[in-house]
Amino acid sequence: MFDFDDLVDEDDPAAVQAPTAGAVQTPILKDPPAAEDDEKTLLEKDVELEQLEADVVRLKAELAELKALPPPEPDLDVVQKLEALWSSYPLGEVGQGLQPSSRLRSGPLVAIWRAYFEHTMPGGLKSAALLRFAQRTDTEVMWTYPNLKCDWNHKLLETSLVIHPVAFQGIKMEVSDEQGRNIVTNGYFQYDTKLGFPQYPYRLQEQDVLYHDAIYAPNVSEAAAERTGGVGVDTKALLNSARSRAASPIKIATLRSAYLAARSVGDADKSHKMLAEDRADDYREVIQSYQKYHLDASLEGKDHPPASKAKNGVLLPLYPRQEPLQQFQPNRVYRGAQYIAWWHGQAHGDKLEGSVPHSMITDLLPSLQSAQANNPFQDRDFASIFMQCRGWLKPHAMAEVILYSDESSLTQLFILLNAGASTHALSGFLKYDVSKGELHQHEVLLATQGVDFLVAFARGQGAAKASKAVLEAA
């Protein structure tokens, strides 16, 4: 138990004494604070506020000075250490991600990704894996040469994937579940990225996808064999065995994308906002190293529209014209409201709300296509796709789905709109014939400039109009 004497301040002569039995205790009230004390407290708060405001001004000035500094010179020691780290992997393996050896050197930026079980299906490689590897590559490419002035975001405008026929001869096949094998598990995929900056403020990129099998040939070296083999191992035999199994990389696919530098990437309720004209000097400084080392002249030129007209098709000039032109002639049109499941969403947009990223389209489409009875598409994986990403599609919500299907040529055009929206969130053109996967201008045109006309037509709105080029494409 506490002793009352312990609670008394012994140094205070006027300390309260212990009450006697039966005594009435009178509460001791403190004198109210004097007015001058209140005034003193307010003055102290004013001084603290002034100090905080001064700190804010100082920090803003320091930040402005840092942003005004030129980009730091590359730390070659760090680059060499990273290259040594990447090359320290066991024989025939390599670190995933952007390869340091491709930085500050002329040529494409090179990224390596390894496929695991989730990237396969009974017929081998999933097209979804190629889109997701590309998405990871794009993120690393954006930060290859960091610069403090790059305080903007990157909004994907368009993307396309064409899987070449050679891929269907070995690593991607149309087989039944009983015949299926996960033949690309542990295989390496290389993404070579070249860039172009035809208009302010967006960039174009083209990526060649190479398949290395489960042995990464560039790391089949004597040093790697000695490092991997250990004591008592015949490193020469190990090296010869690895070389006999190492395959030359095969180009299996090509991707093209357009990204806009945006001060706001928007969300499902509002459109994105491009970087303002007064940031042009900062933008040009940020892209200098990309232009110096990784520029592809074929991605430059004034054929590409200005950013203000990006909805007309930024990538359009990169695709060949088809001669003779084979029109898209849909024999079925579907329009309906469908639920977009929550698991198709990721955190995207200004509000970081769940949105459906473009790389999830391969998982989403089969469930949307299943609403059409006896359609030939839902059980297939596509050979090529072009997509325009005008906005953000909400998951865990209803959406308007429009499908134009040409079943004889195994092609389909899809348009996805948030419920009640007048502008589409995603649109695209799909080709399922593995021998005719190349994309052409008129197909890209339909999925960009033709969308408003096709939406109005599907809704039965008689005032729908289209350009001559769009009408000739379909």
Image (spheres, rainbow, N blue to C red):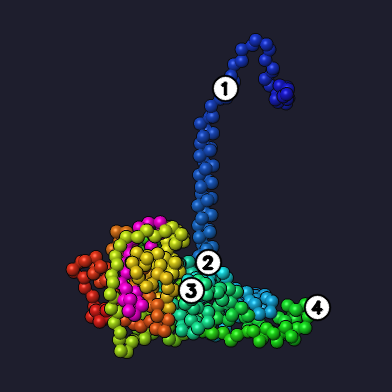
* Nearer the camera: disc 4 or disc 1: 4
The span from disc 4 to disc 1 (Cα, nearest Å) is 85 Å
The question of residue 406 being in magenta is answered with: yes
| Viewer-nearest residue: 240 or 258 | 240
Q: Are marks 4 and 1 in contact (CB under 8 Å)?
A: no
Q: How far from the left and from the top, in percent, is residue 178? A: 52, 72
Kind of residue at badge 2: Glu
Q: Can residue 304 be seen by looking at this rendering? A: no
Does dot 1 land on a helix, a strand or a loop? Answer: loop
| Residue 203 lies in quadrant | bottom left
> Percent position (x, y) of residue 473?
28, 81
Q: Which residues are magenta?
A: 390-412
Query: Camera-side residue: 117 or 46?
Result: 117
Identify the residue at horizontal 74%, vertical 85% (top origin).
237
Observer-nearest of 314 and 179: 179
Q: Which mark is residue 29?
A: 1
Q: CA distance from mark 1 to mark 3?
A: 89 Å
Q: Which residue is mark 2?
A: 65
| Type of amino acid at the residue the image marks with label 3 | Ser
Instruction: Give the residue number, with chain letter if any, for mark 3.
Output: 176
- Mark 4 — residue? 231
Image position of 217 with respect to 119: above or below: below
Q: Quadrant of residue 342?
A: bottom left
**What residue lies at 30% left-to-right and 84% top-to-bottom?**
326
CB under 8 Å between callouts 3 and 4? Answer: no
| Distance CA(mark 3)–CA(mark 2) | 63 Å
Determine whether the residue tagged by mark 2 lies in a helix, strand or loop.
helix
- Gap between marks 3 and 4, in whole Å? 46 Å
